[in-house]
Image (spheres, rainbow, N blue to C red):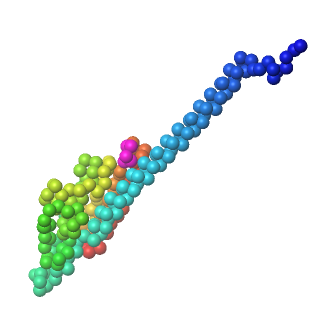
Amino acid sequence: MIASRSQAGFTAIELLVSFAVAAIVLAGATLAFQTSQTATLTFTDQASAQQKARWGLERMIQEIRGAGVDPCTPPRCPSVPPHFDAITNQSPIMLTIQSDFNGNGIIDPPGGACDPAAVTERVRYQLNGNQLQRSTDPNNAACDATVASGVTALSFTYLDEAGNPTAVASAIRTVVISVTIASENGGSEKSVAMADRVRIRNR
């Protein structure tokens, strides 16, 4: 009596074909998972870099916009404002912001130990290596505090009242900020570049 196919089972060739098909399906599923995982990590890295860039920019923008507070007028001060430059020691990667918060006509040095949260009349931002640093006492290196790490590029451009580039501190009315921050895992494809234009409202 001839055995039916269900009794005879699969041939060796049929088993090999089945294993090959299963291997191809498994490889495809693995590739799809890896691609999805890579895309998710890239998106997460870009979002993290963008958040760091935005936070660093927003803090600088707020302080630059409010620079140049100078309420001292005669007779307390011998002349009308301004008595100092709102932005000084400016360079492509560094600037110092000045304000006379107590209205005595001068920029007072900070008092006491370094305190990143303290309100001082002179604040410096600078790029140091790959760190954007803020200092409440530019004359004391120990007061440098990191605002954002992973900074691959920082650029300050200074414009006068007419919107033209200027190197004269007293003529600065607008600061253009450009910053590029890499993700935690690095790689130019995961970097985020942001820029903003800030008008100094007190000048």
Residue 157 highlighted magenta (yes or no): no
Q: Which corner quadrant of the image does residue 26 belong to?
A: top right
Residue 17 as seen in the image, left or right of residue 65: right
Residue 43 vertical placement versus 137 (above, below): above
Residue ID at (23%, 50%): 128
**Could you tell whether 25 is left or right of 34 in the image?**
right
Q: State the image coordinates of residue 186 (x, y, percent, origin top left).
A: 37, 43
Residue at 18% across / 74% down in the picture? 100
- Residue lying at the far bottom of the rendered structure: 75
61 above or below 75?
above
Direction top: furthest residue = 1
Residue range in magenta is 182-186
What secondary structure is the magenta-colored segment mainly?
loop
Quadrant in which the C terminus is drawn: bottom left
Residue 151 at x, y = what percent?
32, 50
Quadrant for residue 120, please give it. Answer: bottom left
Task: Compare residues 10 and 169 and report the one nearer the observer.
Answer: 10
Please state the total of marks drawn on the protein image.
0
Left or right side of 137 for 33 = right
Q: Is residue 150 among what the camera can see?
A: yes
Front one among 4 and 185: 4
Determine if residue 92 is in view.
no
Residue at image coords 43%, 44%? 189
Residue at 26% across, 74% down: 202
Residue most toward the left? 78
> Residue 176 in the image: x percent, y percent?
32, 61
- Percent from the top left, x then y, of residue 37? 51, 42
- Name above or below for residue 126 compared with residue 66: above
Q: Nearer the viewer, residue 181 or 10?
A: 10
